[in-house]
Image: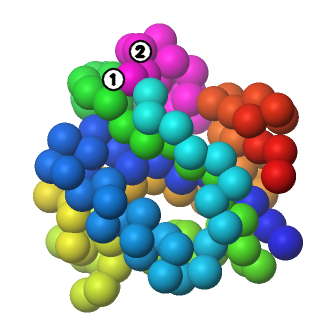
Amino acid sequence: MERTFAIIKPDAFAADHAGKILARIYAEGFKVVGLKKIFMSKVEAEGFYYVHKERPFFGELTDFMSSGPCVVMVLEAPGAIKKWRDLMGATDPAKADAGTLRKEFGTSIGENATHGSDAPETAAFEIPYFFSGLELLG
Ligand code: CMP
């Protein structure tokens, strides 16, 4: 069994899409091991996305992620990392396949509704960034 880290980003949360996205998560067979609504600070967003700190969009990305509440989650399933990335679709909603979350709920490459870990090492950083072990029991 594998775990991945997922976010319902501020654009999707503000547009009241969290319920529909969660329904898709359950329908696809993920176990939701951790879930909470948070309002990330700019500093927390910068720490979370530090791998992108040299990218031209880093300021825009971290402003957006700290612009409103979001939902952070730990999802469990066989092959959870790829399974969640497949459900999200391509980073750019315009390039995402029909039926994916980013196609349905994303509006631009920056405001793309959801985030997911891209590799086991990334999940190993991202999960404990927002969740303590105690929050992931059961
Ligand atoms: P995410 O999966 O959260 O990981 C990094 C994020 O950076 C990505 O989703 C996009 O939302 C964002 N991103 C990637 N490329 C760009 C870009 N060219 N302009 C703005 N944001 C971007």
Residue 86 visible, this orientation:
no
- 3 sits left or right of 54 in the view: right
Q: At x 51% / y 18%, what residue is drawn?
A: 44
Secondary structure of the residue carrying numbered label 2: loop
Q: Main secondary structure of the magenta part?
A: helix
Q: Which residues are magenta?
A: 39-54
Q: CA distance from mark 2 to mark 1?
A: 5 Å
Q: Is residue 45 above or below residue 6?
A: above
Q: What's the amino acid at mark 2?
A: Ser
N-terminal-most mark, 2 or 1: 2
Residue at the spot of label 2: 41
Please tell me how crowded label 1 is: few (under 14), some (14-19), or many (20+) other residues with Cα within 10 Å.
many
Contact check, label 2 and label 1, Cβ < 8 Å: yes
Which label belongs to residue 111?
Answer: none
Q: Which one is nearer the viewer's eye here, 112 or 55?
A: 112
Q: At x 26% / y 27%, what residue is drawn?
A: 68
Please tell me how crowded label 2 is: few (under 14), some (14-19), or many (20+) other residues with Cα within 10 Å.
some
Q: At x 70% / y 41%, what residue is drawn?
A: 127
Q: Quadrant of the N terminus?
A: bottom right
Residue 28 location (% of width, % of height): 53, 82
Q: How many marks?
A: 2
- 18 sits left or right of 73 in the view: left
Q: Is residue 62 above or below residue 16?
A: above
Residue 88 location (% of width, % of height): 41, 70
Residue at the spot of label 1: 66
Q: What's the amino acid at mark 1?
A: Ser
Residue 131 location (% of width, % of height): 69, 33
